[in-house]
Image (tube, rainbow, N blue to C red):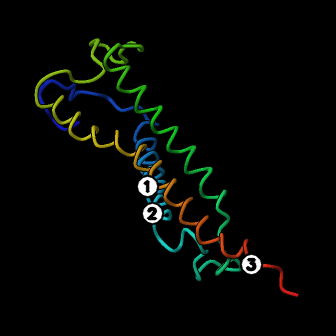
């Protein structure tokens, strides 16, 4: 792929693999951008460019539940990936017996590029809790006020 020593550069891509990798990248980027809604105003009120819904407040559970489930899923996947790398739960998929590079520049590139992803789940969980607290604090005065009429 990158031509790094210790990694199979003669890999033959299946027909479905390239679109899968591109699709996975687009979906991952979309979810990462949705996480910005936890800290931006458009995560609390529907933006003005959305027809028929603009200006409406977004219900807190509609944001907190998917975000919390996503954070939990990301942390479980990362834990599985790390534990699988350490204990080898799943047999390597290629014919050489090596699923990933284990030494040299290729292993260094693998770990330095994927290691920051381990922070995504915990950081998303922190953002979710902060969003929930902020929105509940914003909604509290409206709940305390007596009914007008």
Instruction: Kindly report which numbered mark, 1 or 3, lies closer to the viewer in this rendering.
Output: 3
Residue 5: image x %, image y %?
11, 28
State the residue position of label 3: 145
Question: Is residue 64 or residue 137 the one in the foreground?
Answer: 137
- Between disc 2 and disc 3, whose residue precedes? 2
- Residue 116 horizontal side relative to residue 32, left or right: left
Question: Is residue 40 or residue 51 the one in the foreground?
Answer: 40
- Between disc 1 and disc 3, whose residue precedes? 1
Residue 100: image x %, image y %?
27, 23
State the residue position of label 1: 32
Q: Secondary structure at mark 3?
A: loop
- Residue 76 horizontal side relative to residue 48, left or right: left
State the residue position of label 2: 36
Q: Residue at x 46, y 37 (%)?
A: 16
Q: Are the residues tagged 2 and 1 within 8 Å (C-beta)? A: yes
Q: Residue at x 20, y 38 (%)?
A: 112
Which residue is farthest bottom?
A: 149
Q: Note whether 23 is above or below 81 in the view shown.
A: below
């Amino acid at each position: 792929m990158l031509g790094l020593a210790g990694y199979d550069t003669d890999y033959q891509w299946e027909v479905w693999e390239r679109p899968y990798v591109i699709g996975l990248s687009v979906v991952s980027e979309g979810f990462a951008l949705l996480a910005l809604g936890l800290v931006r105003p458009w995560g609390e009120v529907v933006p003005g460019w959305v027809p028929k819904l603009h200006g409406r407040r977004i219900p807190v559970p509609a944001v907190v539940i998917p975000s919390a489930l996503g954070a939990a899923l990301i942390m479980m996947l990362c834990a599985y990936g790390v534990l699988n790398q350490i204990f080898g739960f799943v047999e390597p998929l290629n014919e050489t017996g090596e699923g990933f590079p284990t030494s040299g520049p290729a292993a260094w590139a693998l770990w330095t590029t994927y290691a920051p992803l381990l922070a995504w789940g915990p950081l998303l969980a922190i953002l979710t809790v902060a969003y929930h607290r902020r929105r509940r604090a914003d909604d509290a005065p409206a709940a305390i006020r007596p009914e007008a009429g």
